[in-house]
Image: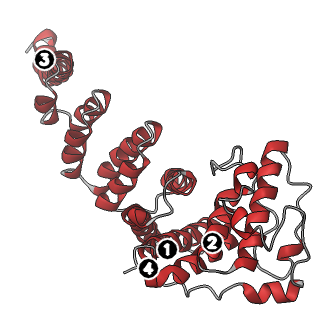
Amino acid sequence: MTFSAKLQVTDRPFLCGRYEEYVDQHYKEYLKDQGKVDSLVGVDVMAALDMYVEREQWEKCLETAAKQNYKVLHKYVALYATHLIQEGSWDKAVALYVQHGTPANSQNFNIYKRLFVEMVNVAGMNNAEAYSSWADLRDLLFNLCENLVKSSDANTPAHEEFETMLLVSHYYATRAAAQSIKQLDTVAAKLSISLLRHTDIIPADKAFYEAGTAAKEVGWENMAFIFLNRFLDLTDAIEEGSLYALDHSDFQYTDIPYEVPLPAKQHVAVSPAVICSPNQVRGGMRGKFCLSRMRLPGARERGSFLPVPLAHRHPK
């Protein structure tokens, strides 16, 4: 056998392999160009999933990804959740993780934190109708914390932070449930006041306003006065862009934090002028309280007004 004949025989598998690769590649490009994503799934599933993302066919993308494995599924769940957050549909992103689970992947932590931040900042969540949204957030964080316990991030600062977020979301969900039953008004008020302990991670002005109005509704006027005054102080601080002038003496013997992030904008659409009008929050107390600071109960006595918070229990 001549050398050229040997070359032709030995090169045939190599050339066939190259042709096969060439044909496959061009077939994939053809399917992409023609938009035949369903056919592409059988040839290159990852390319098909990316194409579903490009075309924003999210349901089809997740359905296909779920047939692969858990890691592939949650890669595209994270992409979809990010897309939903960018569009302002944080509630759909929360529901997405409730449906598919919340893996303890550190690359997802910013998504989970963003969902928490979006929920505690949005308006219209201090009512019984908001229960399902708060319960979904609580379930998301509960699942995450359960997974963190079994991961390499167990007992890390990130784990502790998510446990605190779980506690806060549990308070919000329980408060919403209590608001649907008149006999549980005091429970809802206690939960609003307990949330003040976490104004380092929830909007302080919103939290004090909700605690003050809840205290007023159940007749706890001393606390209502203190909390609404704090709300007004925070409103002034937001306008001035500094917390420097805040007086912390009213909270000296409580575990309500002094150092809290200054909100970039007011979360409550109520001006001090409205609060001080006869028909509004402080106007309802005008017979007892006035705009100038009256003598408040002593600090130790004030501390005794704060209800004991409900014990934290993980949702089941």
How far apart are the alpha carbons under marks 2 and 1? 10 Å
Dot 2 falls on a residue whose secondary structure is helix
**Residue located 22% across and 51% down the image:** 66
How far apart are the alpha carbons under marks 3 and 2? 82 Å
Residue type of the residue flagged with mark 2: Leu
Sooner in the amino-acid sequence: mark 2 or mark 1: 1
Residue type of the residue flagged with mark 3: Lys
User: Eyeballing the image, is 158 above or below 123?
Assistant: below
User: Eyeballing the image, is 236 above or below 42?
Assistant: below
Crowd class of label 2 (few under 14; some 14 to 19; many from 20; radius 10 Å): many
Does the residue at mark 2 contact the one at mark 1 (Cβ under 8 Å)? yes
Residue type of the residue flagged with mark 4: Lys
Dot 4 falls on a residue whose secondary structure is helix
How far apart are the alpha carbons under marks 1 and 3? 83 Å
Does the residue at mark 3 contact the one at mark 2 (Cβ under 8 Å)? no
Residue carrying label 3: 6
Q: Which callout, 1 or 3, points to the residue nearer the camera?
A: 1
Dot 3 falls on a residue whose secondary structure is helix
- The quarter of the picture where the C terminus appears is bottom left
Residue carrying label 2: 195
Sooner in the amino-acid sequence: mark 3 or mark 4: 3
Question: Residue 129, image x and y in percent?
Answer: 39, 63
Q: Tell me, for residue 182, which label it has, or none.
A: 4
Looking at the image, the residue that sits furthest to the left is 1
User: Relative to 93, is 35 on the left or the right?
Assistant: left
Crowd class of label 4 (few under 14; some 14 to 19; many from 20; radius 10 Å): few
